[in-house]
């Protein structure tokens, strides 16, 4: 199996607007990224960034203007390749006359499964999404979180290798979001590749390996979550135990610092410096002074902080 599940190269999509259709809007502008097999990848961006257009191209619902897109080594939209994809759309609607069981029969049929195959899989699948007792209940009695879990169940019913999930935890309570994260983590451990589009940045930060930030049709950042959240130099925070005067003297080389003794006898020191040499010197002095170093960590932005920084620093859209 290829190590790359999704590959996008220089992808462009233009739309014509206006009565005379002379105005061109570039929805996607040379978008490129890869998603490794068995990873959870997050697509982020403000409204109008081109996220929905990108997903529709991956699913073969919209034709690209230029560039290339591949899923599991096959061109996006390829009929054989689409059998390896499970999809949960945003604001999906399940007909109210269906139950959990009959909904899976319906969607399983659309995925090419026989009723016998669906009957064989549905019990275990509903149990996996915590709906085992709701199989014979009309979906009109389901909560939003239950509908989302049933939507994920239909997406994985035919055992696809790639899952494309559009706002999978939208409207779900904290307990439900935790359950969905656990399920996605299990699917990742089974080798499934999961591509998530979401506005819930805290959820993305908790579950995704890598993310791409799409702004006005362009990828502004793509990479590991921890790398994107360390875009700006942040202070270094020490938690120490020992004589406060000796701790203070250990940091004499760095003027920009704060020291806060705590009631539990610990001392929190925050350093504002870009010099690793000075930090190393302070650590050596702390050890010489027999100060216990309980933790050292560089503070970092949340994904939301990094996202806002990237989005607000973007250039204006190009419309010609």
Image (spheres, rainbow, N blue to C red):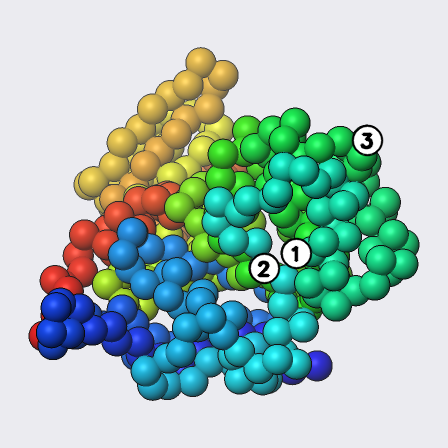
Give the camera-side residue of 216 and 101.
101
Residue 41 is situated, as x and y percent measured from the top left of the image, at 51, 61
Whether residue 77 is situated above or below residue 148 in the rendered picture: below
Image mark for residue 276: none
Give the camera-side residue of 225 and 81.
81
Q: Earlier in the sequence, mark 3 or mark 1?
A: 3
Image mark for residue 133: 3
Per the model, the C-alpha gap separating discs 3 and 2 is: 24 Å
**Residue on which disc 1 sits:** 155
Q: Is residue 184 visible?
A: yes
Residue 282 is situated, as x and y percent measured from the top left of the image, at 36, 46
Per the image, label 3 sits on a secondary structure element best described as helix
Residue 84 is situated, as x and y percent measured from the top left of the image, at 67, 72
User: Is disc 3 surrounded by few (<14), some (14 to 19) or many (20+) residues within 10 Å?
Assistant: few
Image mark for residue 87: 2
Whether label 2 touches label 1, CB < 8 Å: yes
Per the image, label 2 sits on a secondary structure element best described as strand
Q: Earlier in the sequence, mark 2 or mark 1?
A: 2
Per the model, the C-alpha gap separating discs 3 and 1 is: 20 Å
Whether residue 169 is situated above or below residue 22 in the rendered picture: above
The residue sitting at 46% across, 55% down in the picture is 197
Side of 39 relative to 117 (left or right): left
Dividing the picture into quadrants, the one containing residue 144 is top right
Side of 10 relative to 99 (left or right): left
The residue sitting at 57% across, 82% down in the picture is 78
Whether label 3 touches label 2, CB < 8 Å: no
Per the model, the C-alpha gap separating discs 2 and 1 is: 5 Å
Q: Earlier in the sequence, mark 3 or mark 2?
A: 2
């Amino acid at each position: 199996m290829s190590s790359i599940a999704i590959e996008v190269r220089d992808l462009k999509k233009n739309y014509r607007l206006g009565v005379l259709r002379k105005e061109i809007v570039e929805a996607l502008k040379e978008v490129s990224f890869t998603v490794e097999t068995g990873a959870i990848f997050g697509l982020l961006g403000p409204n109008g960034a081109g996220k929905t257009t990108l997903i529709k191209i991956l699913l073969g619902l919209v034709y690209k203007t230029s560039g290339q897109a591949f899923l599991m080594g096959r061109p996006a939209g390829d009929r054989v390749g689409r059998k390896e994809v499970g999809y949960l759309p945003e604001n999906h609607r399940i007909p109210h006359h269906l139950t959990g069981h009959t909904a899976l029969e319906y969607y399983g049929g659309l995925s090419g499964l026989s009723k016998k195959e669906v009957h064989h899989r549905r019990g275990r699948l509903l149990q996996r999404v915590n709906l085992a007792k709701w199989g014979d209940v009309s979906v009109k009695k389901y909560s939003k979180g239950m509908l989302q879990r049933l939507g994920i169940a239909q997406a994985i019913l035919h055992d696809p290798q790639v899952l494309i999930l559009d706002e999978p935890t939208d409207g779900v309570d904290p307990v439900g979001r935790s359950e969905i994260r656990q399920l996605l983590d299990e699917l990742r451990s089974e080798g499934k590749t999961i591509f998530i589009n979401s506005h819930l940045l805290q959820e993305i930060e908790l579950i995704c390996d890598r993310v791409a930030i799409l702004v006005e049709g362009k990828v502004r950042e793509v990479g590991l979550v921890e790398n994107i959240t360390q875009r700006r130099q942040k202070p270094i925070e020490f938690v120490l135990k020992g004589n406060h005067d000796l701790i203070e003297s250990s940091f004499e080389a760095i003027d920009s610092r704060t020291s806060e003794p705590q009631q539990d006898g610990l001392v929190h020191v925050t350093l504002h410096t870009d010099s690793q040499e000075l930090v190393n010197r302070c650590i050596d002095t702390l050890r010489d002074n027999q100060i216990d170093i309980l933790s050292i960590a560089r503070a970092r932005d949340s994904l939301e902080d990094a996202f806002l920084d990237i989005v607000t620093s973007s250039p204006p859209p190009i419309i010609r």
